[in-house]
Amino acid sequence: MDAGPIRPRRLRGTAALRRLVAETALTPADLVLPLFVKEDAREPVPVASMPGVVQHTRDSVRKAAHDAVEAGVGGLLLFGIPAQKDDRGSAADDPDGIIQRTLRDLRTEFGDDTVLIADLCLDEYTSHGHCGVLRETRTGEWIVDNDATLDRYATIAVAQAEAGAHVVAPSGMMDGQVGAIRTALDGAGFSDTAILAYSAKYASALYGPFRDAAECAPAFGDRRGYQQDAANAREALREVALDVAQGADMVMVKPALAYLDIVRAVRNAVDIPVAAYHVSGEYAMVEAAAAQGWIDRRAVILELLTGIRRAGADIVITYWASEAARWLH
Ligand code: PBG
């Protein structure tokens, strides 16, 4: 039988034709590299569940940042791991805390040549590993106190902005966090510091390896009381709308691959940049399969990152950012 006059294969015949008609571009500038800095590390500490990822020293993080900037990566997302933790996460807004020191180092070194994004949360800093401060209920349970946590986030945001963050990224999923942070930043003279809101952040088992990297597994319970349920999509749009109304400059969906429908829905709902975070568990799965020789590592990575862009993400946060950026040159 004749296939007829319409033959989509015509445009797939050569690499040049495929390049010409590509609908989605993956470019280094759209990628953001997460980096972990550990206060008491004397040398970089490999993260067993994330092959290729390390907990950096203040020195080695500068080298990794250089490598990323040289590769053309669009920004760096920084996580601090303090030497001392307590129940209110005091190190998070200490001007001499590890994240503030690192931000000052990198801002001095790179100025405005890259975008420094500070993860704004308490789980890496609290002794109990929850994303906020705790309160005991009348029935004797411990829960994360939403509004007391907002006060902590407000001072952390100012400390991070003072230290040189271009963008703060609240990831704790507390109600009202974007508004509280915006007010605090503006009040302290940081009206130019942007907010990348982790708006649709799901309670995901795919964060497992990250909790090794950031040493922040909750000491009891889980995060389902504040992060979203995987079953819900409309709820994500509600969270995004609230964050936009409170002044978010960019919004994020996290994780990425199991939530591409959410990425698309958010992309259609807002006119500000949308980021998607390809998280630690998603990374670990690919690295494990590649290490077994079961998949073509490079091809799979590029396919996954392109898929996240195609779903509607303007910005892709990925542990492969530097490596992928080099492949894209
Ligand atoms: C919270 C935070 C988490 C991640 C980023 N920010 C962990 C959590 O919410 O439990 C996970 C990132 C990843 O898995 O790669 N500070």
Image (spheres, grey):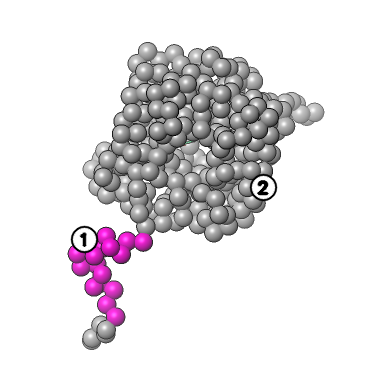
Magenta stretch bounds: 6-23
Residue for point 48% across, 46% down: 275
Residue for point 46% across, 32% down: 116
Q: Is label 2's Cβ within 8 Å of ligand 1? A: no
Left or right: 298 as drawn, with respect to 58: left
Which label sits on residue 168? none
Which label sits on residue 15? 1
Q: Position of residue 303 (x, y in %)?
A: 33, 52
Name the residue nearer the viewer: 172 or 142.
172
- The residue furthest right is 138
Q: Amino acid at mark 2?
A: Ala
Q: Is residue 8 magenta?
A: yes
Residue for point 25% across, 47% down: 296
Principal secondary structure, stretch drawn in magenta: helix
Residue 285 visible (yes or no): no
Q: Residues within 10 Å of mark 2 (few under 14, many from 20)?
A: few
Which secondary structure, mark 2?
helix
Q: Amino acid at mark 1?
A: Ala
Which label sits on residue 245? 2
Q: Is residue 122 magenta?
A: no
Q: Quadrant of residue 23?
A: bottom left
Q: Position of residue 66 (x, y in %)?
A: 33, 28
**Quadrant of the snapshot with the C terminus:** top left
